[in-house]
Amino acid sequence: MAAIIELSNVGMVFPSVMGRGSVRALEDINLEFHADEFVVALGASGCGKTTLLNVIAGFIPPTSGTIDHKGEPIAGPGRDRGVVFQKHALFPWLNVVENTEFGLKLQGVGQSERRRVARENLALVGLTEFEQHPVYQLSGGMQQRVGLARALTSNPEMLLMDEPLGALDAFTRENMQELILRVWKKTGKIVFFITHSVEEALFLATRLIVMSPRPGRITHEYRLDFSAKYFASGNARSIKSDPKFIAIREEVLSIIYGEETEQ
Amino acid sequence: MFRLSFAGRRRVSVDPYGAPGSGNSMLISAVTIAVILFAWWLVTYLELIRPLFLPSPGLVFSKFQKIACTEYYYDMLLVFVGARAEVTAECAGFSEHTLHEHALWSLYRVFSSFFLAALTAVPIGIAMGMNRLARGVFDPPIEFYRPIPPLAYLPLTIIWFGIGDFSKVFLIYLACFAPIAINARAGVRSVSIEQIHAAYSMGASRRQVVWQVVIKAALPEILTGMRVAIAFGWTTLVAAEMVAAKAGLGVMVLNAARFLATDIVFLGIVVIGLVAFLFDLLMRWIEKTLVPWKGMM
């Protein structure tokens, strides 16, 4: 199966600031994204996860290597890659539905058509009743759902999610994980998801990449099927407490802790 | 909650470990105003201070009636409804103008200056926030003139633009310009990088990012700048009207001071203060209506 997004030998060096040495945020990253994949990047702070996402999104050009979208090099951000951020990304001057339809409005899509698409996506994330609410009155979890609906409304091929659940409480977080899986299953988007929660990563990913810092690179890769098991059983907790799940969780944790203690 | 704040019960703080200074202070402010007015009245009633230094509230009010020509306009009203044949009360005003004429002249000067300042300072401030060149060009002159008291460059505006209304409007314009420009510039900085990135990844052009994200995000601070600016405008008014103005609240105060008419000085101060306060209330209402998300995200 051909890769939709392909990173070859991507490196990112941030120049030195105030006499301190330059930072090798990413080194020799080779990564492919195929249709229907849910790729999760996991790693300690400073391992270059967010830089990797920013490079794929097109916000910063890599200092070396290439990123191709179906064979064409990526030059900057684009509608084919929607982004969901951890926070501070909604527009408080717009209400829920206006935030959601923002991308279509930019493209000049007429009011009734863009409302229709925005409402479809709000229904998908369970916010139908809140479409007229101001976003600044919503809870953190609901704000993230608006962010997800907004990214979906531009109908991207890929969703880039930068620790979207990082600022939420544990209960909301687990519910949101299930919601994100359902949305992924239903829409068939490629997802690239960043987290520093091992449990979250294992539960969501079809492919997990573990990154290590200085220089940021991919050290381990896992193919996982816990999300498929979740779709079969519908019980998230039983999957997360399954002995197999726990065994991989401890293995991944020891990789991350191992790197921490090396320094 | 409201009941708890009244005296007569054991003093209970509604929220002892909440943020300091929370709660409504309207009632307290009303009491403060009443106490000040009462003290003013009491001191003058007991003749503790001579009227030359502190005229009584009654005296100031009667000056208000005289200069505002309240009786004259009341007569006119009676004639209009047919209750009286002709206007008998006289209308003298002060410095050849009634109070509302003075007030309208001042309002015209302050607001034409304010609107000109808003029209120019908002785009310049936004440009300064978004463009290195604009920031480099406009930063030195604005930061240089901003702390200089308007009285210091008043003579210069008169030498350059004469004693007409233009130099007065220009002086107030300068006072309004800096706070609007500086706040607009800061407002541009308050947009989050996530908001900008989100817009770009939804296919926004640079132009769309500027118009539909940056300027919207800057709006709360632009409005704060305008609120500060209008207050600066009133502060500068008296200075602007010092030279060769025929009418205006500043002129009224200055002329009255020349004749030691302290009561009229008081009247002028009270009117300027009230008008400025009312416009501040209006600005606050506009803020609440236009940018209800201010401080919420």
Image (cartoon, grey):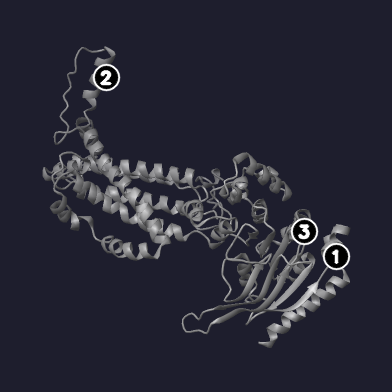
Looking at the rendered structure, the secondary structure element under dot 3 is helix
Q: Tag 2, which chain?
A: B
Residue A151 left/right relative to B186: right
Q: Position of residue A69 (x, y in %)?
A: 66, 65
Q: Amino acid at mark 1?
A: Ile
Residue position marked by numbered label 2 in the rendering? B77
Q: Tag 1, which chain?
A: A
Residue position marked by numbered label 1 in the rendering? A239
Q: Position of residue B199 (x, y in %)?
A: 56, 56
Quadrant of residue A157 within the rendered picture: bottom right
Q: Amino acid at mark 3?
A: Leu
Residue B27 visible, this orientation:
no
Task: Give the camera-side residue of B211 and B129.
Answer: B211
Q: Position of residue A112 (x, y in %)?
A: 63, 39
Q: Does mark 3 fall on the same chain as mark 2?
A: no
Residue position marked by numbered label 3 in the rendering? A181
Q: Nearer the viewer, mark 3 or mark 1?
A: 3
Looking at the rendered structure, the secondary structure element under dot 1 is helix
**N-terminal label among 3 and 1:** 3
Q: Nearer the viewer, mark 1 or mark 2?
A: 1
Q: Nearer the viewer, mark 2 or mark 3?
A: 3
